[in-house]
Image: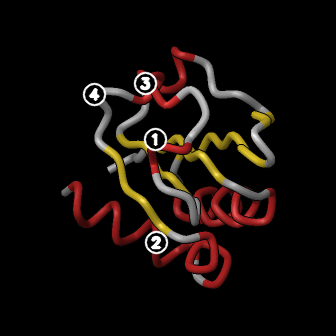
Amino acid sequence: MNLNIVAVCENEQSARALEVAGKELGYIISCEIQESNKIENKLSEETIKSSNVVLFVTNKSIEEIEEIERFIDREYYEVEPKFVIENPINVLSEISSDLN
């Protein structure tokens, strides 16, 4: 399965880890960073709609995500940044196996 994942990350380190792991696994990974109530590299509506799943990489609750309404009706997963930074391939592989 060629996964297309959009990720909302609370830091650049987790976004970079996902992008590198995604490239290695052949997945399409698009990340935005939400830090200090600011959105960097904001995902377009088209990018979100074309994805298979949304991954929230945050220590916050989902309700604290900026502009959360953009992700309504999308299947999503939540994970703490430390798990993505430590083993992004495992995180992406678990999502892939769950979707299959």
In this rendering, the label closer to the viewer, 4 or 3: 4
Rounded to the nearest angstrom, the CA distance separating label 4 from label 3 is 13 Å
Rendered image quadrant of residue 99: bottom left
Q: Is residue 93 above or below residue 26?
A: below
Picture coordinates of residue 54, whole percent (x, y): 43, 43
Q: Residues within 10 Å of mark 4 (few under 14, many from 20)?
A: few
Q: Looking at the image, do the residues carrying marks 2 and 4 touch, with CB atoms under 8 Å apart?
A: no
Q: Which secondary structure lies at badge 2?
A: helix
Pointer 2 or 4: first along the chain = 4
Q: How is the image coloured?
A: secondary structure
Q: Secondary structure at mark 4?
A: loop
Q: CA distance from mark 1 to mark 4?
A: 16 Å
Residue neighbourhood size for the residue with mark 2, other residues' Cα within 10 Å, grouped as few (<14), some (14–19), many (≥20): some
Q: Is residue 10 left or right of residue 98?
A: right
Residue, far left: 100
Q: Residue furthest bottom?
A: 86
Q: CA distance from mark 1 to mark 2?
A: 14 Å
| Mark 2 or 4: the one toward you | 4
Mark 3 surroundings within 10 Å by alpha-carbon count, few (fewer than 14), some (14 through 19), many (20 or more): few
Residue beneath disc 2: 91
Q: Secondary structure at mark 3?
A: loop
Label 1 CA crowd tier, 10 Å (few <14, some 14–19, many 20+): some
Q: Nearer the viewer, mark 1 or mark 4?
A: 4
Q: Which numbered disc covers residue 50? A: 3
Identified by mark 1, the residue type is Asn
Task: Please give the residue where the numbered disc 4 appears in the rendered image.
Answer: 73
Distance from Cα at disc 2 to Cα at disc 4: 22 Å
**Which residue shows up at 35% across the image and 27% down it?**
72
